[in-house]
């Protein structure tokens, strides 16, 4: 676990007594690989999945490698969605990247500024991934109903 959201959740897990947490990192599973993802989720057998994984590197990486970031993040989300569907995991939360903030937002960005304008141009791969992920979640919900 190397991301900001996962690390923060890991630090606060003690606030949830009675909840058993499993934290994963790239070393545990390449979530871009559907078969590896299904095998990993099958081994862990969670009651729910809080999917925080993403390829991120800020606006700079998004602008330098937009196609790679889009592909990798879509594959991660599709693999997790499909693993949850195939294995009957009824609760799934996907978190989107924090790189979708307005270009003119004051830095460091305050939570109240997140929606003060259109997302930075370099966030396009993240926006596309988020749109695709949202549609996939809706499809999964209908398929599991």
Image: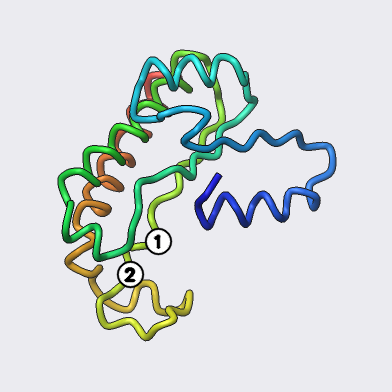
Q: Give how far across and how far down residue 60 sits, in percent.
A: 24, 65
Q: Quadrant of residue 145?
A: top left
Which circle marks residue 101 in the picture? 2
Q: Are marks 2 and 1 in contact (CB under 8 Å)?
A: yes
Q: Is residue 83 left or right of residue 91?
A: left
Q: Residue at x 21, y 52 (%)?
A: 125
Q: Give how far across and how far down residue 79 sits, in percent.
A: 37, 26
Give the answer, above or below, for where 19 lies relative to 114.
above
Name the outermost residue toward the front.
Answer: 27
Give the answer, above or below, for where 67 lies relative to 120.
above
Helix, strand or loop for disc 2: loop
Which circle marks residue 98 in the picture? 1
Q: Give how far across and how far down residue 77 sits, in percent.
A: 36, 35
Graded by Cα atoms within 10 Å as few (under 14), some (14 to 19) or many (20 or more), the crowding at tag 2 reads many
Q: Quadrant of residue 57?
A: bottom left
Foreground of the two, 38 or 145? 38
Name the outermost residue toward the right.
Answer: 17
Foreground of the two, 140 or 80? 80
Q: Residue at x 40, y 30 (%)?
A: 31
Q: Give how far across and how far down residue 8 sits, in percent.
A: 62, 57
Alpha carbon distance from label 2 to label 1: 7 Å
Q: Residue at x 79, y 47 (%)?
A: 16
Give the answer, above or below, for where 83 lies relative to 62.
above
């Amino acid at each position: 676990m190397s991301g900001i959201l996962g690390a923060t959740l890991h630090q606060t897990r003690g606030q949830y007594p009675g909840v058993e947490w499993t934290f994963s990192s790239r070393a545990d599973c390449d979530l871009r690989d559907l078969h590896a993802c299904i095998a990993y989720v099958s081994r862990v057998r969670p009651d729910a999945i809080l999917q925080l994984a993403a390829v991120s590197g800020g606006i700079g990486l998004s602008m330098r490698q937009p196609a790679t970031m889009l592909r990798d993040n879509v594959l991660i989300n599709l693999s997790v969605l499909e693993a949850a569907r195939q294995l009957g995991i009824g609760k799934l939360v996907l978190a989107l990247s924090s790189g979708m903030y307005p270009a003119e937002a004051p830095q460091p960005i305050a939570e109240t500024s997140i929606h003060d304008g259109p997302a930075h141009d370099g966030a396009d791969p993240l926006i596309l991934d988020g749109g695709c992920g949202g549609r996939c979640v809706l499809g999964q919900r209908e398929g599991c109903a």
